[in-house]
Image: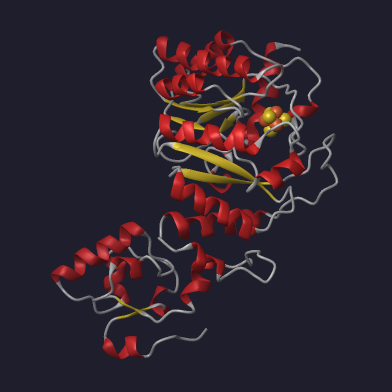
């Protein structure tokens, strides 16, 4: 296989690892093989694997089906990335790997790639993956050179993972390593779940992630909707609809950004523990009285659909100077959300009117 074909295969294989929600990746990613458009500081991320073959048996994963020797050495990958960076074609690297022989060897390759890049003057964004079962010393070394590190939990529990992957031990290979990752890079690590491959409900997913945010404080959790791949044991399994993935991101935001409790979020699940295809924040707001713009505390503002943490603080600052009288005053504070007026009131009379109808 030529070098160009290898790079193409390794970047294609990395597409299921997320470093921003898929909905935030731009269309340009499809026109630039190997590049995903990430949000924020890093705008053009090269997502790539070091090894495109894996001896593990995760039923949802296409890398396990690769029979060709598709690998780059750390020095080769560093050369390719530095060339793209210097030419202005990439300004961030997301590096993961299959595990063709043993995990230590694959991890050492990821660490070495990061170290070479830093030695050779690359000072941009690097997100490096921790593989299941990684040694603590390798995790510490990754954290020294990377801006972000992550290990995928893949499933919400040990029993769900055992339905998908016989080799990985959820408690030892993943949960224990997650605590090391959180120690090595507090608040700047992430994780990812595959949604819909193991028949898990959204209640299981949300209970799992509520525990993750409480115990380990990851910066983000990503949801990768299951997509069946030819040649894998789940090839005939139904794909996860995109809306399920998107609703999970919204429910995640309720826990992570808006301080809803798991018990509150559970209130919008159906009898079988699944989210409906509707904005969970709006569903919850229907059960609550209107929020008094001039008196409500921050926590109540955060529960209003269409108001985020930044704008909630702006409203609080503005009303210190003068009472807010209308939606126009809210718009002046940056509140642009559709239908916000249904959830707020500007005086006692409205507030007393309590729960409103739709
Ligand atoms: S460990 Fe599992 S998910 Fe990761 S590359 Fe190997 S087969 Fe795929």
- Is residue 243 in view? no
Where residue 104 sits, quadrant-wise, is top right
Q: In which quarter of the image is ligand 1?
A: top right
In this image, 197 relative to 356: left or right?
A: right
Residue drawn 56% across the image and 38% down it: 175
Front in this rendered view, residue 190 or 244:
190
Position of residue 261 measured from the top left corner of the image (x, y, whole percent) = 46, 63
Give the image quarter of residue 348. bottom left
The residue located at (50%, 19%) in the rendering is 138
Q: Which residue is drawn at 41% across and 10% down?
A: 119
Q: Nearer the viewer, residue 237 or 332?
A: 237
Residue 215 lies, in percent from the top left, at 45, 46
Tell me the quarter of the image containing the N terminus. Answer: top right
Question: In this image, 108 relative to 316: left or right?
Answer: right
Label tally: 0
Placement of 348 over or under 256, stated as above or below: below
Which of the 4 image quarters holds residue 306?
bottom left
- From the top left corner, tell me how far across and down residue 242 is, in percent: 66, 54
Q: Up-down: is 229 above or below 205?
A: above
Classify 139 as above or below 303: above
Q: Which residue is drawn at 33% across and 66% down?
A: 299
* Residue 277 visible, this orientation: yes
């Amino acid at each position: 296989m030529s070098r160009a074909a290898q790079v193409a295969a390794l970047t294609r294989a990395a597409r299921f690892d997320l470093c921003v929600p898929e909905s935030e990746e731009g269309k340009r990613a499809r026109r630039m093989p190997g590049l995903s458009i990430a949000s924020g500081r890093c705008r053009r991320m090269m997502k790539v694997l070091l090894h495109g073959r894996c001896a593990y048996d995760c039923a949802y994963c296409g890398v396990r089906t690769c029979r060709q020797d598709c690998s780059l050495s750390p020095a080769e990958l560093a050369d390719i990335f530095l060339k793209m960076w210097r030419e202005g074609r990439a300004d961030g690297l997301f590096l993961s790997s299959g595990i063709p022989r043993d995990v230590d060897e694959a991890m050492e390759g990821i660490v070495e790639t990061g170290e070479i890049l830093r030695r050779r003057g690359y000072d941009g964004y690097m997100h490096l993956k921790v593989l299941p079962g990684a040694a603590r010393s390798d995790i510490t070394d990754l954290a020294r050179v990377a801006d972000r590190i992550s290990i995928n939990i893949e499933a919400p529990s040990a029993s769900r993972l055992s339905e998908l992957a016989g080799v990985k031990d959820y408690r030892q290979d993943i949960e224990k390593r997650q605590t090391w990752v959180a120690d090595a890079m507090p608040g700047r690590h992430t994780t990812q779940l595959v949604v819909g491959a193991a028949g898990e409900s959204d209640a299981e997913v949300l209970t799992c992630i509520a525990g993750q945010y409480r115990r380990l404080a990851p910066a983000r959790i990503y949801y990768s909707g299951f997509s069946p791949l030819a040649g894998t044991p789940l090839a005939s399994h139904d794909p996860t609809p995109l809306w399920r993935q998107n609703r999970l991101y919204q429910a995640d935001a309720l826990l992570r950004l808006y301080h809803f409790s798991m018990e509150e979020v559970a209130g919008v699940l159906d009898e079988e523990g699944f989210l409906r295809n509707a904005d969970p924040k709006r569903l919850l707001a229907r059960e609550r009285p209107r929020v008094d713009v001039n008196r409500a505390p921050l926590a109540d503002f955060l529960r209003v659909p269409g108001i985020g943490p930044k704008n909630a603080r702006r409203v609080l600052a503005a009303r210190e100077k003068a009472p807010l009288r209308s939606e126009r005053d809210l718009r002046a504070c940056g509140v642009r959300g559709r239908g916000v007026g249904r959830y707020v009131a500007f005086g006692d009379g409205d507030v007393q009117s309590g729960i409103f109808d739709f």
